[in-house]
Amino acid sequence: MHIYLDESGSFGAATHLGSWCVVAAYVVPEAAIDGMSFTLREYKRMAGFPPTSEVKRRHAPIAAYLRLLNNLASNDGFLVAVATDAGANGDVLANQRLQVHEIRSAIGLHTEAERCAASDLAYAVERLSPQLYVELICRLLLIWRVIKLSTLRFGLSYPEALHAFRWRFDAKNTQITQFEQAFGPTFIGLALNMSRKDPLLLLPGGDRSWLDRYRRTPPDPLPAHAADAVWLDPTTLITDDLQFVDSRESEGVQVADLLASGIGSCLRQRSATPRRQGRLLGRLMLRLDDIDDAVVLVGFDSSQKTSISTETLSALHRMKLASHALLRHR
């Protein structure tokens, strides 16, 4: 399974509300890679560019972009997105301090090695800049959501897709960025923490042997809410096959960029065709159940949810209505 990630917007503090930042992932099984490539090349052809070029959404006619979204819906991939309003994140430092406190005191670790690892992780998170902290948390939530949705989506219909998770991130330049440096131990430590609090669930039946390489020993005692959970090791699941790549050389990352940009333009009310674009983007999205959101919003300030404009709420609702829920909520 191939997972391509990119973002739209800056995660630094903004001076006005509605400064939406989006991280998006396009998840596609091996068998659907050719279909994705054909769709992207057709988009470039319609935009008047050669197939080897990278064509940003702003450089293409809206008709070509909408055709891209429509054609992707017939492929076997899906879209996952997380968004935050940088103009409403006035309490990032307080949130960061709370995260550090939880790492140090609330994990419930038993061995000295676990306690030392938690202490090191807390120190690393404490040293992150606010902008990098926001981006890491958004990407962490995105990646864990990709894992949860893909294991449910392909667990019964296409379990062999779960044998390998191939992550491809957009590398911003030839130099190692601050994000790439922080992504290693700090990110994996946060992912381990999240996996303890939010373990995976799989539907009954199907061949689960494809996930054996990622299984880990469940905690003791087992949390009451996770009696039927599948305990996977994020360390191997995320880092086994992860690369930061040049988007000019990766068609999948180019698709992720186009999707993230499209979502961002809908949330920022800058789309020329907001209703149609929102519906087409929503058709590509999966939700866990019928009460889940298509685009997950992350707030670092208690006022963020009350500060969302009516137009942005309409865009979010439009994408949710067009998306597909994997489970029925009870």
Image: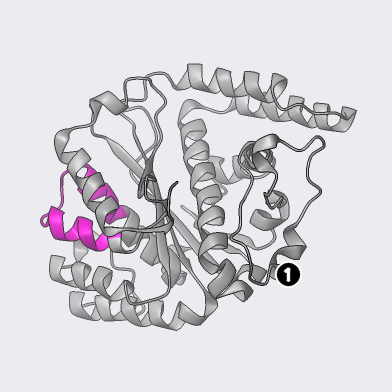
Q: Main secondary structure of the magenta part?
A: helix
On the image, which quarter does residue 272 sit in?
Answer: bottom left
**Residue 53, placed above or below residue 190:** below
Note whether residue 23 is visible. yes
Q: Residue at x 67, y 42 (%)?
A: 226
The percent position of residue 293, horizontal first and vertical second, equals: 36, 45
Residue 147: x %, y % from top left: 56, 55
The magenta stretch spans residue 113: no
Which residue is rendered at x = 64% and y = 22% of the image? 102
Magenta segment includes 278: yes
Q: Residue furthest right?
A: 112
Residue drawn at x 21%, y 51% is 318
Q: Which span of residues is magenta-colored?
A: 261-282
For numbered disc 1, what is the local secondary structure?
helix
Please, what is the three-letter code of the amino acid marked with disc 1?
Ser
Name the residue at the left extreme.
272
